[in-house]
Image (tube, rainbow, N blue to C red):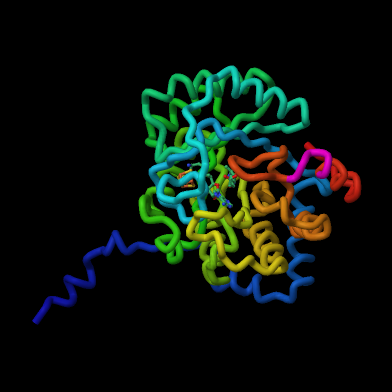
Amino acid sequence: MPNTATAAKTPAVHQYDPPKRWPRPAIQALFDLPFLDLLWQAAKTHRAHFPPNRVQRSSLLSIKTGACPEDCAYCPQSGHHQTGLAKEKLLPIEEIVAAAKAAKARGASRFCMGAAWRSPRDADLPQIEATVQAVKNLGLETCATLGMLSAKQAKRLAQAGLDYYNHNLDTSPEFYPEIIGTRTYQDRLDTLENVRQAGMHVCSGGILGMGETQADRVGLLAALANLPTPPESVPINNLVPVPGTPLADAEPLDNLEFIRTIAVARILMPRSYVRLSAGREKMSDEMQALCFMAGANSIFYGEALLTTENPATDRDQQLFARLGLIPE
Ligand code: SAM
Ligand code: DTB
Ligand code: SF4
Protein backbone atom coordinates (compact mmCIF):
# COMPACT_ATOMS: atom_id res chain seq x y z
CA MET A 1 0.00 0.00 0.00
CA PRO A 2 1.37 3.48 -0.75
CA ASN A 3 2.22 5.53 2.30
CA THR A 4 -0.47 8.17 1.89
CA ALA A 5 0.51 9.97 5.10
CA THR A 6 4.01 10.64 3.69
CA ALA A 7 2.62 11.51 0.27
CA ALA A 8 0.23 14.04 1.78
CA LYS A 9 3.10 15.71 3.63
CA THR A 10 5.27 16.17 0.51
CA PRO A 11 4.84 19.80 -0.51
CA ALA A 12 3.92 19.95 -4.21
CA VAL A 13 5.86 23.16 -4.75
CA HIS A 14 5.57 23.01 -8.53
CA GLN A 15 1.78 22.91 -8.19
CA TYR A 16 1.58 25.92 -5.92
CA ASP A 17 -0.94 28.30 -7.38
CA PRO A 18 -0.60 31.72 -5.72
CA PRO A 19 -3.79 33.61 -4.90
CA LYS A 20 -4.95 35.67 -7.86
CA ARG A 21 -5.73 39.35 -7.63
CA TRP A 22 -8.41 38.75 -10.24
CA PRO A 23 -9.84 35.21 -10.47
CA ARG A 24 -11.32 34.46 -13.90
CA PRO A 25 -14.94 34.12 -12.65
CA ALA A 26 -14.78 37.66 -11.24
CA ILE A 27 -13.55 38.92 -14.62
CA GLN A 28 -16.24 36.97 -16.46
CA ALA A 29 -18.82 38.57 -14.15
CA LEU A 30 -17.67 42.01 -15.38
CA PHE A 31 -18.09 40.92 -19.02
CA ASP A 32 -21.59 39.68 -18.09
CA LEU A 33 -22.73 43.07 -16.74
CA PRO A 34 -25.21 45.07 -18.80
CA PHE A 35 -23.10 47.15 -21.22
CA LEU A 36 -24.01 50.51 -19.70
CA ASP A 37 -23.41 49.30 -16.12
CA LEU A 38 -19.97 48.08 -17.16
CA LEU A 39 -19.14 51.38 -18.87
CA TRP A 40 -20.32 53.33 -15.84
CA GLN A 41 -18.13 51.28 -13.49
CA ALA A 42 -15.12 51.58 -15.83
CA ALA A 43 -15.58 55.34 -16.22
CA LYS A 44 -15.82 55.75 -12.42
CA THR A 45 -12.64 53.69 -11.97
CA HIS A 46 -10.89 55.74 -14.64
CA ARG A 47 -11.81 59.06 -13.04
CA ALA A 48 -10.78 57.83 -9.58
CA HIS A 49 -7.22 57.22 -10.82
CA PHE A 50 -6.61 59.61 -13.71
CA PRO A 51 -7.63 63.13 -14.62
CA PRO A 52 -10.49 62.84 -17.11
CA ASN A 53 -10.36 63.87 -20.78
CA ARG A 54 -6.62 63.28 -21.25
CA VAL A 55 -5.04 61.13 -23.94
CA GLN A 56 -1.37 60.16 -23.91
CA ARG A 57 0.21 59.86 -27.37
CA SER A 58 2.94 57.41 -28.39
CA SER A 59 4.42 57.36 -31.89
CA LEU A 60 5.75 54.20 -33.50
CA LEU A 61 8.60 53.52 -35.88
CA SER A 62 9.61 50.20 -37.37
CA ILE A 63 13.39 50.33 -37.04
CA LYS A 64 13.92 46.87 -38.56
CA THR A 65 11.19 45.60 -40.83
CA GLY A 66 10.20 42.17 -42.13
CA ALA A 67 11.65 38.65 -42.43
CA CYS A 68 11.00 37.87 -38.77
CA PRO A 69 11.78 34.25 -37.83
CA GLU A 70 8.66 34.04 -35.61
CA ASP A 71 5.38 32.68 -36.99
CA CYS A 72 2.79 34.98 -35.31
CA ALA A 73 -0.38 34.36 -37.35
CA TYR A 74 -1.49 38.00 -37.25
CA CYS A 75 1.80 39.57 -38.27
CA PRO A 76 2.66 40.97 -41.70
CA GLN A 77 6.35 40.91 -40.73
CA SER A 78 6.64 37.17 -40.16
CA GLY A 79 8.96 35.47 -42.65
CA HIS A 80 6.53 32.51 -42.53
CA HIS A 81 3.86 34.45 -44.45
CA GLN A 82 3.89 35.93 -47.96
CA THR A 83 2.72 39.48 -47.42
CA GLY A 84 4.94 41.16 -50.02
CA LEU A 85 6.60 43.29 -47.36
CA ALA A 86 10.06 44.60 -48.27
CA LYS A 87 12.66 43.31 -45.84
CA GLU A 88 14.88 46.00 -44.34
CA LYS A 89 18.03 46.22 -42.23
CA LEU A 90 18.23 48.05 -38.90
CA LEU A 91 17.77 51.74 -39.71
CA PRO A 92 20.72 54.06 -39.09
CA ILE A 93 20.56 56.09 -35.88
CA GLU A 94 20.21 59.43 -37.76
CA GLU A 95 17.08 58.22 -39.53
CA ILE A 96 15.50 57.06 -36.27
CA VAL A 97 16.35 60.32 -34.47
CA ALA A 98 14.89 62.34 -37.36
CA ALA A 99 11.63 60.34 -37.08
CA ALA A 100 11.60 60.86 -33.32
CA LYS A 101 12.06 64.63 -33.76
CA ALA A 102 9.15 64.69 -36.20
CA ALA A 103 7.01 62.70 -33.74
CA LYS A 104 7.84 65.16 -30.97
CA ALA A 105 7.00 68.10 -33.24
CA ARG A 106 3.58 66.47 -33.92
CA GLY A 107 3.00 66.26 -30.18
CA ALA A 108 3.90 62.70 -29.20
CA SER A 109 5.27 62.28 -25.66
CA ARG A 110 6.70 58.79 -26.18
CA PHE A 111 8.57 57.23 -29.08
CA CYS A 112 8.36 53.46 -29.54
CA MET A 113 10.85 51.62 -31.73
CA GLY A 114 9.86 48.19 -33.06
CA ALA A 115 12.08 45.53 -34.59
CA ALA A 116 10.99 42.31 -36.30
CA TRP A 117 13.33 40.14 -34.27
CA ARG A 118 12.90 37.00 -32.21
CA SER A 119 15.27 38.76 -29.82
CA PRO A 120 18.02 41.31 -30.30
CA ARG A 121 21.53 40.02 -31.10
CA ASP A 122 24.11 41.24 -28.63
CA ALA A 123 25.96 42.70 -31.64
CA ASP A 124 22.98 45.02 -32.30
CA LEU A 125 22.77 46.30 -28.73
CA PRO A 126 25.41 49.07 -28.91
CA GLN A 127 23.51 50.72 -31.77
CA ILE A 128 20.18 50.30 -29.97
CA GLU A 129 21.66 51.75 -26.77
CA ALA A 130 23.05 54.78 -28.62
CA THR A 131 19.68 55.28 -30.36
CA VAL A 132 17.75 55.12 -27.08
CA GLN A 133 20.07 57.73 -25.56
CA ALA A 134 19.72 60.02 -28.57
CA VAL A 135 15.90 59.78 -28.56
CA LYS A 136 15.78 60.37 -24.82
CA ASN A 137 17.98 63.47 -25.25
CA LEU A 138 15.20 64.95 -27.41
CA GLY A 139 13.03 65.02 -24.29
CA LEU A 140 10.86 62.08 -25.30
CA GLU A 141 9.97 59.04 -23.25
CA THR A 142 11.52 55.99 -24.87
CA CYS A 143 9.96 52.60 -25.59
CA ALA A 144 11.21 49.63 -27.60
CA THR A 145 9.77 46.33 -28.73
CA LEU A 146 12.54 44.06 -29.97
CA GLY A 147 11.27 40.57 -29.06
CA MET A 148 12.48 38.44 -26.17
CA LEU A 149 15.09 39.87 -23.80
CA SER A 150 17.50 38.09 -21.48
CA ALA A 151 18.01 39.54 -18.00
CA LYS A 152 21.37 40.95 -19.14
CA GLN A 153 19.94 42.60 -22.26
CA ALA A 154 17.10 44.13 -20.23
CA LYS A 155 19.63 45.63 -17.79
CA ARG A 156 21.67 47.11 -20.63
CA LEU A 157 18.62 48.73 -22.18
CA ALA A 158 17.53 50.11 -18.81
CA GLN A 159 20.99 51.58 -18.29
CA ALA A 160 20.84 53.18 -21.72
CA GLY A 161 17.73 55.05 -20.54
CA LEU A 162 14.91 52.96 -22.00
CA ASP A 163 11.77 53.90 -20.07
CA TYR A 164 9.32 51.25 -21.38
CA TYR A 165 9.60 47.85 -23.00
CA ASN A 166 6.65 46.52 -25.00
CA HIS A 167 6.13 42.77 -25.14
CA ASN A 168 2.54 41.60 -25.50
CA LEU A 169 0.99 38.44 -24.08
CA ASP A 170 -1.32 38.77 -27.11
CA THR A 171 -4.09 36.37 -25.99
CA SER A 172 -5.02 33.75 -23.37
CA PRO A 173 -2.54 30.96 -22.58
CA GLU A 174 -5.07 28.47 -24.02
CA PHE A 175 -5.57 30.18 -27.40
CA TYR A 176 -1.93 31.23 -27.74
CA PRO A 177 -0.70 27.97 -29.41
CA GLU A 178 -3.24 28.52 -32.23
CA ILE A 179 -1.53 31.83 -33.02
CA ILE A 180 2.19 31.37 -32.29
CA GLY A 181 4.30 28.22 -32.47
CA THR A 182 7.84 29.56 -32.32
CA ARG A 183 7.88 30.94 -28.77
CA THR A 184 5.87 29.98 -25.70
CA TYR A 185 3.67 31.93 -23.32
CA GLN A 186 6.26 31.24 -20.63
CA ASP A 187 8.97 32.78 -22.84
CA ARG A 188 6.89 35.96 -22.91
CA LEU A 189 6.33 35.93 -19.15
CA ASP A 190 10.09 35.47 -18.64
CA THR A 191 10.84 38.52 -20.80
CA LEU A 192 8.30 40.60 -18.86
CA GLU A 193 9.95 39.51 -15.61
CA ASN A 194 13.42 40.45 -16.96
CA VAL A 195 12.10 43.87 -17.99
CA ARG A 196 10.53 44.40 -14.56
CA GLN A 197 13.67 43.27 -12.70
CA ALA A 198 15.77 45.67 -14.77
CA GLY A 199 13.60 48.53 -13.49
CA MET A 200 11.89 49.49 -16.76
CA HIS A 201 8.18 50.15 -17.11
CA VAL A 202 6.28 47.26 -18.61
CA CYS A 203 4.04 47.72 -21.64
CA SER A 204 2.05 44.55 -22.35
CA GLY A 205 -1.35 43.88 -23.85
CA GLY A 206 -2.90 41.87 -26.62
CA ILE A 207 -4.88 41.60 -29.82
CA LEU A 208 -8.61 41.10 -30.11
CA GLY A 209 -10.47 39.78 -33.15
CA MET A 210 -8.22 36.80 -33.91
CA GLY A 211 -11.11 34.31 -33.60
CA GLU A 212 -10.66 33.95 -29.84
CA THR A 213 -13.65 33.40 -27.54
CA GLN A 214 -14.77 35.74 -24.80
CA ALA A 215 -13.23 33.25 -22.34
CA ASP A 216 -9.90 33.89 -24.09
CA ARG A 217 -10.32 37.64 -23.65
CA VAL A 218 -11.00 36.94 -19.96
CA GLY A 219 -7.84 34.76 -19.90
CA LEU A 220 -5.69 37.47 -21.51
CA LEU A 221 -6.85 40.14 -19.06
CA ALA A 222 -6.42 37.72 -16.14
CA ALA A 223 -2.84 37.00 -17.21
CA LEU A 224 -2.05 40.73 -17.42
CA ALA A 225 -3.85 41.86 -14.28
CA ASN A 226 -2.40 39.00 -12.19
CA LEU A 227 1.24 39.67 -13.08
CA PRO A 228 3.24 40.30 -9.89
CA THR A 229 2.96 44.00 -10.79
CA PRO A 230 0.45 44.82 -13.55
CA PRO A 231 1.89 46.54 -16.66
CA GLU A 232 2.01 50.34 -16.52
CA SER A 233 0.85 50.40 -20.12
CA VAL A 234 -1.67 48.01 -21.70
CA PRO A 235 -2.08 48.21 -25.48
CA ILE A 236 -5.33 46.69 -26.72
CA ASN A 237 -5.02 46.06 -30.45
CA ASN A 238 -7.91 45.27 -32.78
CA LEU A 239 -6.57 42.89 -35.41
CA VAL A 240 -5.53 44.63 -38.63
CA PRO A 241 -6.14 41.78 -41.07
CA VAL A 242 -3.28 41.71 -43.58
CA PRO A 243 -3.53 39.74 -46.85
CA GLY A 244 -1.08 36.84 -46.89
CA THR A 245 -1.29 36.23 -43.12
CA PRO A 246 -3.30 33.24 -41.81
CA LEU A 247 -5.70 35.73 -40.13
CA ALA A 248 -6.37 37.74 -43.30
CA ASP A 249 -10.02 36.61 -43.35
CA ALA A 250 -10.70 36.55 -39.61
CA GLU A 251 -14.27 37.53 -38.68
CA PRO A 252 -14.12 41.10 -37.29
CA LEU A 253 -14.91 41.38 -33.59
CA ASP A 254 -18.21 43.02 -32.63
CA ASN A 255 -17.49 46.68 -31.75
CA LEU A 256 -19.40 46.52 -28.45
CA GLU A 257 -17.35 43.51 -27.39
CA PHE A 258 -14.15 45.43 -28.16
CA ILE A 259 -15.36 48.34 -26.00
CA ARG A 260 -16.41 45.90 -23.25
CA THR A 261 -12.87 44.48 -23.20
CA ILE A 262 -11.37 47.97 -22.83
CA ALA A 263 -13.76 48.64 -19.94
CA VAL A 264 -12.84 45.41 -18.16
CA ALA A 265 -9.12 46.15 -18.67
CA ARG A 266 -9.65 49.57 -17.05
CA ILE A 267 -11.40 48.06 -14.01
CA LEU A 268 -8.79 45.30 -13.53
CA MET A 269 -5.79 47.63 -13.97
CA PRO A 270 -7.02 50.96 -12.60
CA ARG A 271 -3.60 52.64 -12.51
CA SER A 272 -2.41 51.51 -15.94
CA TYR A 273 -2.57 53.46 -19.16
CA VAL A 274 -4.94 51.50 -21.42
CA ARG A 275 -3.99 52.19 -25.03
CA LEU A 276 -6.45 52.08 -27.89
CA SER A 277 -3.92 50.60 -30.29
CA ALA A 278 -3.93 48.99 -33.77
CA GLY A 279 -7.24 49.06 -35.63
CA ARG A 280 -8.20 52.73 -35.08
CA GLU A 281 -8.01 53.37 -38.82
CA LYS A 282 -11.32 51.52 -39.23
CA MET A 283 -12.99 52.93 -36.10
CA SER A 284 -15.52 55.73 -36.26
CA ASP A 285 -15.19 58.76 -33.98
CA GLU A 286 -18.20 57.45 -32.03
CA MET A 287 -16.54 54.06 -31.47
CA GLN A 288 -13.34 55.73 -30.25
CA ALA A 289 -15.37 58.06 -28.00
CA LEU A 290 -16.93 55.01 -26.32
CA CYS A 291 -13.47 53.45 -25.89
CA PHE A 292 -12.30 56.64 -24.12
CA MET A 293 -15.47 56.59 -21.98
CA ALA A 294 -14.64 52.96 -21.12
CA GLY A 295 -11.25 54.05 -19.81
CA ALA A 296 -8.81 54.09 -22.72
CA ASN A 297 -6.43 57.01 -22.11
CA SER A 298 -3.69 56.53 -24.66
CA ILE A 299 -3.31 56.01 -28.41
CA PHE A 300 -0.72 55.36 -31.09
CA TYR A 301 -0.39 58.68 -32.86
CA GLY A 302 1.03 59.27 -36.33
CA GLU A 303 0.13 58.08 -39.81
CA ALA A 304 1.72 54.64 -39.48
CA LEU A 305 1.80 51.86 -36.93
CA LEU A 306 4.76 49.60 -37.81
CA THR A 307 3.88 48.51 -41.34
CA THR A 308 0.16 49.35 -41.56
CA GLU A 309 -1.80 52.59 -41.51
CA ASN A 310 -3.01 54.61 -38.55
CA PRO A 311 -5.34 57.65 -38.70
CA ALA A 312 -3.76 60.85 -40.02
CA THR A 313 -2.74 63.27 -37.26
CA ASP A 314 -5.15 65.96 -38.47
CA ARG A 315 -8.01 63.46 -38.19
CA ASP A 316 -6.92 62.78 -34.60
CA GLN A 317 -6.66 66.53 -33.89
CA GLN A 318 -10.25 66.89 -35.07
CA LEU A 319 -11.29 63.96 -32.89
CA PHE A 320 -9.67 65.56 -29.82
CA ALA A 321 -11.42 68.85 -30.61
CA ARG A 322 -14.80 67.17 -31.18
CA LEU A 323 -14.54 65.32 -27.87
CA GLY A 324 -12.85 68.05 -25.82
CA LEU A 325 -9.90 65.75 -25.13
CA ILE A 326 -6.57 67.15 -23.99
CA PRO A 327 -3.75 65.32 -25.80
CA GLU A 328 -0.57 64.67 -23.81
N1 SAM B 1 8.85 41.50 -32.75
C1 SAM B 1 8.52 42.07 -31.51
C2 SAM B 1 7.58 41.21 -30.71
O1 SAM B 1 6.74 40.51 -31.27
O2 SAM B 1 7.70 41.22 -29.50
C3 SAM B 1 7.96 43.46 -31.61
C4 SAM B 1 7.03 43.90 -32.70
S1 SAM B 1 5.43 43.14 -32.76
C5 SAM B 1 4.87 43.70 -34.32
C6 SAM B 1 4.46 44.05 -31.55
C7 SAM B 1 3.00 43.69 -31.41
O3 SAM B 1 2.23 44.23 -32.48
C8 SAM B 1 2.60 42.23 -31.40
O4 SAM B 1 2.83 41.61 -30.18
C9 SAM B 1 1.11 42.32 -31.69
O5 SAM B 1 0.38 42.40 -30.49
C10 SAM B 1 0.97 43.61 -32.49
N2 SAM B 1 0.56 43.32 -33.88
C11 SAM B 1 1.33 42.80 -34.86
N3 SAM B 1 0.63 42.66 -36.01
C12 SAM B 1 -0.63 43.10 -35.76
C13 SAM B 1 -1.82 43.19 -36.53
N4 SAM B 1 -1.87 42.77 -37.79
N5 SAM B 1 -2.92 43.70 -35.94
C14 SAM B 1 -2.89 44.11 -34.65
N6 SAM B 1 -1.80 44.04 -33.87
C15 SAM B 1 -0.67 43.54 -34.40
C1 DTB C 1 1.37 47.13 -29.85
O1 DTB C 1 0.73 46.52 -28.99
N1 DTB C 1 0.88 47.49 -31.04
C2 DTB C 1 1.87 48.16 -31.83
C3 DTB C 1 3.07 48.25 -30.85
N2 DTB C 1 2.61 47.53 -29.71
C4 DTB C 1 4.40 47.88 -31.27
C5 DTB C 1 2.14 47.51 -33.13
C6 DTB C 1 0.90 47.31 -33.98
C7 DTB C 1 1.32 46.70 -35.28
C8 DTB C 1 0.20 46.59 -36.27
C9 DTB C 1 0.64 45.94 -37.53
C10 DTB C 1 1.70 46.69 -38.26
O2 DTB C 1 1.59 47.92 -38.46
O3 DTB C 1 2.67 46.05 -38.70
FE1 SF4 D 1 8.04 38.85 -35.44
FE2 SF4 D 1 6.94 40.41 -33.59
FE3 SF4 D 1 5.72 39.98 -35.93
FE4 SF4 D 1 5.84 38.00 -34.18
S1 SF4 D 1 4.79 39.95 -33.90
S2 SF4 D 1 6.27 37.84 -36.39
S3 SF4 D 1 7.83 38.37 -33.27
S4 SF4 D 1 7.62 41.03 -35.62
Residue beneath the point at 72% across and 25% down: 102
On the question of residue 150 being in view, the answer is yes
Is 187 positioned to the left or the right of 171 in the image?
left
Residue 149 % position (x, y): 41, 37
Q: Quadrant of residue 2?
A: bottom left
Farthest residue toward the bottom? 1
User: Residue 71's x, y, as percent?
Assistant: 41, 51
Location of residue 275 with respect to 16 vertically, above or below:
above
Residue at image point 56% right, 65% down: 250
Image quadrant where one finds the C terminus: top right
Q: Can residue 21 be seen in this snapshot?
A: no
Q: Outermost residue, front direction? A: 84
**Residue 106 appears at what percent x and percent y?**
77, 30
Q: Is residue 138 part of the magenta span, yes or no?
A: no
| Dominant secondary structure, magenta | helix
Magenta region: 311-315
- Specify whether 107 is left or right of 94: right
Q: How many marks?
A: 0
Furthest residue to the left? 1
The residue lying toward the viewer, choosing from 24 and 142, is 142
Quarter holding the N terminus? bottom left
Q: As displayed, is residue 239 above or below residue 217?
A: above
Give the residue drawn at x 78%, y 55%.
Answer: 288
Say whether residue 314 is magenta.
Answer: yes
Residue 121 shown left or right of residue 276 in the figure: left
Residue 318, horizontal then vertical, whole percent? 87, 44
Residue 147 to residue 284: above or below = above
Report the front residue among 37 and 128.
128
Residue drawn 29% across the image and 60% down it: 14
